[in-house]
Image: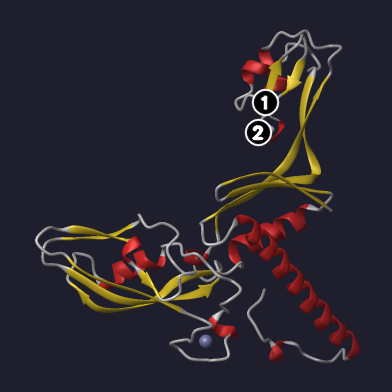
Amino acid sequence: LKVEVVDKKGDTLRFILRDVEISFANALRRIMIAEVPTMTIDDVFFFDNSSVLSDEFLAHRLGLIPLTTDLDSYVLPEKCECKSDMGCDRCRAILTLEIRAEKEGRTVYTGDLKSEDPKTRPVSDKIPIVKLAPGQGLKFEAYARLGQGKTHAKWQAVSEGIYKNLPRVEIDQDRCNLCGNCVKACPPGVLAISGEKLTVENLLDCSLCNFCEEACPLDTPAVRACAVEDCFLFTIESTGALPPERIVSEAAVILAEKLRDFGEEFEHLVEEPGRDTKDEEKNDQP
Ligand SMILES: [Zn+2]
């Protein structure tokens, strides 16, 4: 197994995973989407809301605000020792807001939220929450907790978590007559003619549409695009809650834990074949 980082732009990371089965690539992708935990507002207590939006509507909007997540300081509420509905410092962070629009109306933005923990704050200060008319006010206390995308999409760490097979473009330079048809036919502009030769410019942009092969006037096309079966190009875009590289490494840790749990359970079963594991289910892991 080999990993190669292609680039990182803002919250988007691209990397190539080589020499793996598609099932492994897909397991990693699914864990990144559904199981890497992030911090999100989960309970809201309203003390004043004279805005045009109802409490439920506002609570739903607040839940969808991505918050920066400190995975090293917090634990999932179900794994916290406090076992309290309201939570403790280890399993929740409180964000508050108190605003009253005076003579002029105003828009309430995520930047108006005040967090008790500076490491848990909105990813952007410019997300509008609600508009207040003169005289209207809003006051609430919001409880943010760790959670997973499989419970609710608001906890999803990635806004995009995809992979595709690494493309390979083969060119038969001896037979290519440099007509340029394939260069024009390729939508992402993968091919180019430079120095009396057909060359591959942006291989990673190839979507394997095969328009280049179809455009070639030869009976057997001089250019051929195919997929490398055991290599995958991943594109991971974080919501901003976690750095994309942390999402990937966290997914790998979760996958390793699952395999270790399975191994231990399996060993017990081999030692005591009659034992029923169903009664001992400790968690809801599929
Ligand atoms: Zn707790």
Label ID, residue 51: none
Q: Which residue is drawn at 66% across and 76% down?
A: 285
Q: Indicate whether 17 appears above or below 279.
A: above
Q: Residues within 10 Å of mark 2 (few under 14, many from 20)?
A: few
The residue at which mark 2 appears reads as 205
Which residue is rendered at x = 76% and y = 57% of the image?
23
> In the image as oriented, which residue stretches furthest toward the front?
118
Q: Does the residue labelled 2 lie within 8 Å of ligand 1?
A: no
Name the residue type under label 2.
Asp
Residue 220: x and y, percent? 81, 17
Marks 1 & 2, CB-CB < 8 Å contact = yes
Q: Which part of the image, by quadrant, shows the C terminus?
A: bottom right
Q: In this view, does 84 lie above or below 56?
A: below
Q: Closest to the observer: 165 or 15?
A: 15
- Dot 1 or dot 2: first in sequence order is 1
Task: Please state the horizontal and vertical placement of residue 138, each as a whole percent of the image.
Answer: 22, 71
Q: In this view, does 208 lie to the left or right of 153?
A: right
Residue 126 occupies which quadrant of the picture?
bottom left
The Cα atoms of the two marked residues, 1 and 2, are separated by 7 Å
Reading the image, the residue beneath label 1 is 190
Residue type at numbered disc 1:
Val
Give x and y (percent) for residue 12: 58, 48
Could you tell me which secondary element the residue under label 2 belongs to? helix
Instruction: Give the side of residue 137 with respect to residue 3, left or right.
Output: left
